[in-house]
Every structure is written in structure tokens, then in C-alpha cells.
Amino acid sequence: MPPRFRATGRLRYSPTNNGKIIRRDGGTTKWWLVIDCDPNIGMYYRELYRIDNYSVRTIQRPAWDAHISVIANEKPDDKFMTAWRKHEGKRIQFEYEHIACGNDLYVWLPVICEEALDLRQELGLSRNPFHPLHLTVGNCKHI
């Protein structure tokens, strides 16, 4: 098992981009819950990515900077709506692995956070999100 680092972030429901709930790809952010992470984590891993790629390939800061997507466009059933935004702004602790993963568009760090999975369950969602918890540090969408 790779070593893990521990950090703290802040919960944000329906995150906005300059006050808008429209994503750059045209989708909505209405039914999203993210953990805003220290932007220095993202900056550090984007720099490591650049160095590892001999400065030939870089990644950019995500629209919401370094973050963990806890809920990604999953509307809870109406009977759970009283819990939506219940924990807005709450600080939450998580662990992340220091070895980055990636594909053609994103670079991320695997995350472990039982409290985030508890929040999904509180909203009637599966504890196993479609994409396992991860800290997004960069993308190469507009480079």
C-alpha cells in the first residue's frame, strides 16, 4: 500500500464558476458536492507533472482548483433533500496517495475519506460512487 498524506478541505454544494452553475463543458453543477482542497496541493502536483514530462507537457488548474468530487451530478431522492447543503462549509479530513493517476484529460490522486462516503449515504446515494473518490489536481482540456 502506498504511503498516504492527510489533509483537510471544506465542503461546497453546487459549486459555481464565477457565480454560474454551468460547467465549461455545458453541464450543470447543481447536484455536485465537492471538498475544496488546499490549492498548494494542486500546484505542487502540476509542477511535478511538468517536471516528469520534461517540461514538454503540462496540465492546468481545474475550474474549482484542487478538489474532491463527492457527488457528481447525482440528484438525491426528494425524501433526502433536507440533508442537501446541511454541511455547507464544514471542514473535513481526508487521506490521499502521493502517486498521481491520469488519463488523456485529468490528473488525480486516489483519496480515502469515510466521512465523505457517509455524506453520500446520508443523501440516499451509494457509498460507492461511479468514480472512486479522488483529488483532481489538473487537466489538459484547454492546453
Image: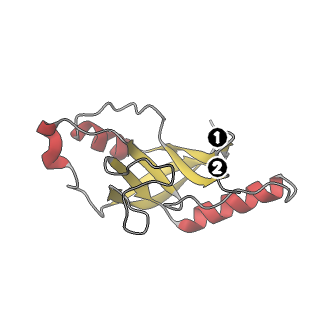
Badge 2 amino acid: His
**At numbered mark 1, what does the secondary structure look like: helix, strand or loop?**
loop
Q: Which residue corresponds to mark 1? A: 2
Marks 2 & 1, CB-CB < 8 Å contact: yes
The spot of residue 36 in percent (x, y) is 44, 60
Colour pattern: secondary structure
Of 143 and 134, the residue lying toward us: 143
**In the rendered view of the protein, which quadrant contains the C terminus?**
bottom right
Q: State the image quarter where residue 90 is shown.
A: bottom left
Q: Distance between the residues labelled 2 and 1?
A: 8 Å
Q: Which residue is drawn at 85% across and 56% down?
A: 56
Q: In this view, does 70 lie to the left or right of 6?
A: left
Q: Which residue corresponds to mark 2? A: 98
Q: Which residue is drawn at 31% across and 46% down?
A: 31
Q: In this view, does 137 lie above or below 125?
A: below
Of 44 and 71, the residue lying toward us: 71
Q: Residue at x 27, y 39 (%)?
A: 75
